[in-house]
Amino acid sequence: MSIIVVDNVKLNGRDGKVILDGITFTVEEGDFLGVLGPSGAGKSSLFKLLNRLLSPTSGEIYYRGKNLKEYDPVKLRREIGYVWQKPYLFGQKVLEDLTYPFRLSQEKPDMELIYKYLAQANLKEEILAKKPTELSGGEAQRISLIRTLLVKPRVLLLDEVTSALDTENTRAILDLILREKEEKNLTVLAITHNLEAFNFKKVLYLNAGQVKYFGEGKI
Ligand SMILES: Nc1ncnc2c1ncn2[C@@H]1O[C@H](COP(=O)(O)OP(=O)(O)OP(=O)(O)O)[C@@H](O)[C@H]1O
Ligand SMILES: [Mg+2]
């Protein structure tokens, strides 16, 4: 069974503008799918649909064979982790952001795991004492990715997570994502303009709200 099925989905904006139209594709468990296309193509809107932050105007989306509408949104968002294009951090300190997933499930924060992810993301432990507003764009992106991983999702939606990173840190983040993916058999959908670094074997190419290509191979 495909883990995600998107069936003829249409999304209109509040102003009636067509944002996505006739979107159909499937994702298999363990896939690493590149979601590509020019600015304004509808890539982030598609991720918002997959995370139930938006609902399709028509068409259906299924996760593990069940319509997305039938899931409790909070539980669904823990299974399908979404790292936003614009990092959203809310704590007084970074530590608060990274311990939030544990508070959510009333667990004791696993500081070992937090330190492990920080090291893999090329970040120093001192960052935990900083205010989120003091972080650089690239630091905020990495903290936001780590926070999502700490929730232990089964699917990762990555919206341009390396867009503010230099080559070395892009490599570090990609290694971290690929290691997590292999260890946990995660399914990963990644929006990026950095095709060289990501080297996808399977891609969904959107343009002006429509699927122009979906399949194996590079474009
Ligand atoms: N809530 C909304 N209401 C109306 N239009 C919207 C809404 N959200 C997004 N749009 C429009 O839909 C189109 C697709 O936006 P989206 O953010 O999905 O593009 P994108 O492919 O992620 O682009 P980028 O690469 O620049 O991030 C754009 O024209 C955008 O202005
Ligand atoms: Mg976008």
Image: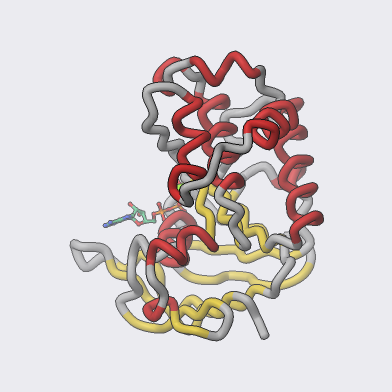
User: In this view of the protein, can residue 102 be seen by the observer?
Assistant: yes
User: In this view of the protein, can residue 35 be seen by the observer?
Assistant: no
Residue at 51% of width from left, 19% of height from top?
Answer: 136
- Name which quarter of the figure residue 170 lies in: top right
Q: Position of residue 194 (x, y in %)?
A: 67, 42
The colour mode here is secondary structure
Residue at 72% of width from left, 46% of height from top?
Answer: 177
Front-lying residue, 126 or 135: 126
- Name which quarter of the figure residue 58 lies in: bottom left
Q: Position of residue 209 (x, y in %)?
A: 44, 66
Q: Is residue 176 above or below residue 204?
A: above
Front-lying residue, 214 or 97: 97
Left or right of 81, for residue 104 = left
Q: Is residue 25 above or below residue 95?
A: below
Number of callouts: 0
Q: Position of residue 196 (x, y in %)?
A: 76, 43
Outermost residue toward the left in this view? 15
Residue at 78% of width from left, 40% of height from top?
Answer: 175
Q: Quadrant of the C terminus?
A: bottom right
Q: Is residue 127 above or below residue 141?
A: above
Front-lying residue, 95 or 107: 107
